[in-house]
Image (cartoon, helix red, strand yellow):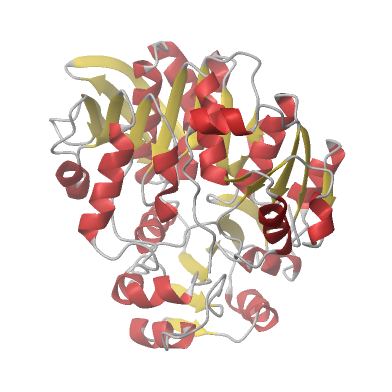
Amino acid sequence: MSVKNTSYGPELIRGMLADCRRLFFIGIGGISMSALAELSMSEGYLVGGSDRSGGPTVEHLKELGIKVFCEHKAENISSFDAVIYTVAISEDNPEYREAIFRGIPCISRADYMGYLMTAFRERIGVSGMHGKSSCTAMCAEIFLSATDATVLCGAPLPAHGNTSCVIGKAREHFLFEACEYMDSFLDFSPTTAVILNIGMDHVDYFHSMEQVRTSFLRFAEKANRVLYNADDPECQRALAGYPYERHTFGLSPNAEFRAENLSSVKGCYSFDFYRGEDLLCRVSLRVPGRHNVYNALASGGAAILSGLATTEVKTGLEKFLGAGRRMEKKGRLASGAMVYDDYGHHPDEIRATLAGAKEMGYSRVICVYQPHTYSRTAGLFNEFAAAFDNADRVLFAPIYAAREQNTFGVSSASLAERIGKKASAYPGFSTLAKVIEQEAQEEDLVLVMGAGDLYKIFDLLKLFR
């Protein structure tokens, strides 16, 4: 069972950490935890942590001088004053149990992040059931082109050293990804709450759309203003009773921040960026997909509401080349097929990304997908089955279990069977890699998708840059 968010709040945490200088992060290799560790180090804390997964993120932390233990042991925390943990750990984690036994302050990731952000004047939180990382990264490009912002993103930022954390010296602008899982985002205090979309996901926690809408409204109510998708019916329902300053973005005529006169070249869109009746600028994006027009409107709108100039918004949007594992080009197979990597793991994300891939001008789109968790696959089974319409071929890896057991009777094979002849399921990555190299041809796009460990398949494919 996962450990719950603490939800102490900034004032109580400030008192808890008043005499603490050494912080231990359980699960420090996670993309958000590693960013918080870096930010804490910049604040003068001595930082250490543990993570069994290893990888580039852990190696980066070690290069910064952060001690990282590769096993979870009680003795690891012996020289630390407080513990920050991710809710992905279980209650029997030996470091967490030792900290509780010794009376060491234990604070959940989101609660601690909510405390850190209070040092900044403008706090822009990007939320939504999907697209958060891409939009946060796009927003970061705007702010970092114009200001000395601090950014905590849920994806690597290739244009900024491939880290998910950029630390500015000023305490003016703080951009962050606001995750809804287990209501983590309710521990944050944004000045601007951006809501990209609202839908059903995390079915192990959210059990109804009413619960989801209530959570997003509560998140918005923590902000001075909300900027939400005018084209998303669930956003409109959730925010109908929002009492503070509200702004909208979208393609509909009633959206405040609006795109008109859209055109595309190989899937990359250009559009006129309006605010109300005022034409702000013409924007030409360098990342594919109609969904990125929405991301541009949301990130551009948030920047303008934070006081940035139109020219700064245009510069940032047109510089943006994407976030790590978000339609990221990995290389070319010997056959000539191009291979891309994407983190998408929700039906709406898959549908949007495949629609963008279809517009890129390739002969076929081959989607290699690893479903993420049994509960999500079972709970959204019909939605997943309908999400691959824009793929010409679908190759499934086994479901990534994460923290779950398969008590749902669902499998990649059952998903492939529902989709039909164009879909097949395979027992492991080595078999899947061979099938990819056998089937992919010169004019094909191979899109590897999933939030689990499917990225390991790139070690099995012979790719040319």
Q: x and y percent of residue 104 in the render? A: 69, 46
Residue in the picture at 16% in, 36% down: 252
User: Does residue 268 appear in this view?
Assistant: no
Q: Is residue 436 above or below residue 65?
A: below
Query: Can you tell which quarter of the image residue 332 is in?
Result: bottom right
**Does 320 sit left or right of 331 as displayed?**
left
Residue in the picture at 52% in, 81% down: 405
Q: Is residue 101 above or below residue 152?
A: below
Q: x and y percent of residue 89 in the render? A: 61, 61
Residue in the picture at 49% in, 19% down: 315
Between 298 and 181, the one lying in front of the other is 181
Query: Can you tell which quarter of the image residue 153 is in?
Result: top right
Q: x and y percent of residue 210 in the render? A: 20, 56
Residue in the picture at 34% in, 58% down: 348
Query: Can you tell which quarter of the image residue 358 is in?
Result: bottom left
Q: Is residue 146 above or below residue 375?
A: above
Between 173 and 210, the one lying in front of the other is 210
Q: x and y percent of residue 202 in the render? A: 39, 63
User: Does residue 82 appear in this view?
Assistant: yes
